[in-house]
Amino acid sequence: MATNRTFTMLKPDALESGNTGKIIDLILSKGFQIKAMKFTVLTEAQAKEFYIEHAERPFYGELVEYMTSGPIIAAILEKDNAVADFRALIGATDPAEAAEGTIRKLYAESKGRNAVHGSDSDESAAREGVFHFAANEIF
Ligand code: IDP
Ligand code: MG
């Protein structure tokens, strides 16, 4: 995947609270283009593998349970400086620490149920995009 791309998931709490339309609209309004998108439910094996870097953290079990608790929307986004600009748009992991106007400040419930994922590097974006999408599902 090109380095002007990032990967995102709208997490189960965002779908439960009915905020997906507003979140996608905000993402598009900031100049990101959607290059792949799907509605899916992660299996336990998929959630464990996706978050494998956190396997030793105390919240790993809770994270896997939450991420498999309902549907998500996965997407690949394109924009200049996509990874850093998208991390800025989503805000800090904990909504209590997220800046005004960020997606997590606006829509996250808690540090765990925080509405949205954004890749933390070009390498992660490439891995995560391929994890969720086949080549012919990416525009
Ligand atoms: P990030 O999503 O901002 O990159 P990470 O530290 O990579 O944050 O953590 C991945 C995800 O794990 C977070 O988005 C959040 O859903 C969950 N998480 C992180 N820290 C905690 C915690 O202290 N308690 C519960 N869940 C957490
Ligand atoms: Mg992270």
Image (cartoon, rainbow, N blue to C red):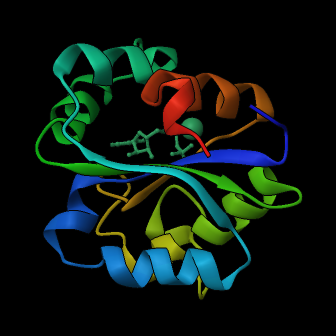
Looking at the image, which residue sits at the far front?
136
Front-most of residues 81 and 132: 132
Whether residue 99 appears in this view of the structure is no
Q: Is residue 11 left or right of residue 130?
A: left
Q: Is residue 82 above or below residue 58?
A: below
Front-most of residues 36 and 9: 36
Q: Is residue 4 left or right of residue 115?
A: right
Q: Position of residue 104 (x, y in %)?
A: 47, 70
The residue that appears at 52% across and 55% down in the rendered structure is: 93
Q: Is residue 131 above or below residue 39?
A: above
Q: Is residue 6 left or right of residue 60?
A: right
Tell me where residue 41 sits by quadrant.
top left
Front-most of residues 96 and 11: 11
**How many marks can you see?**
0
Tell me where residue 77 sits by quadrant.
bottom right
- Ligand 1: which quarter? top left
Q: Is residue 129 left or right of residue 23?
A: right
Whether residue 55 appears in this view of the structure is yes
Q: Is residue 18 above or below residue 36?
A: below
> In the picture, which quadrant includes the N terminus?
top right
Q: Position of residue 119 (x, y in %)?
A: 63, 41
The residue that appears at 24% across and 13% down in the rendered structure is: 45
Q: Position of residue 105 (x, y in %)?
A: 48, 78
The residue that appears at 78% across and 55% down in the rendered structure is: 82
Q: Position of residue 42 (x, y in %)?
A: 23, 31
Tell me where residue 68 sits by quadrant.
top left
The residue that appears at 61% across and 78% down in the rendered structure is: 28
Looking at the image, which residue sits at the far right?
80
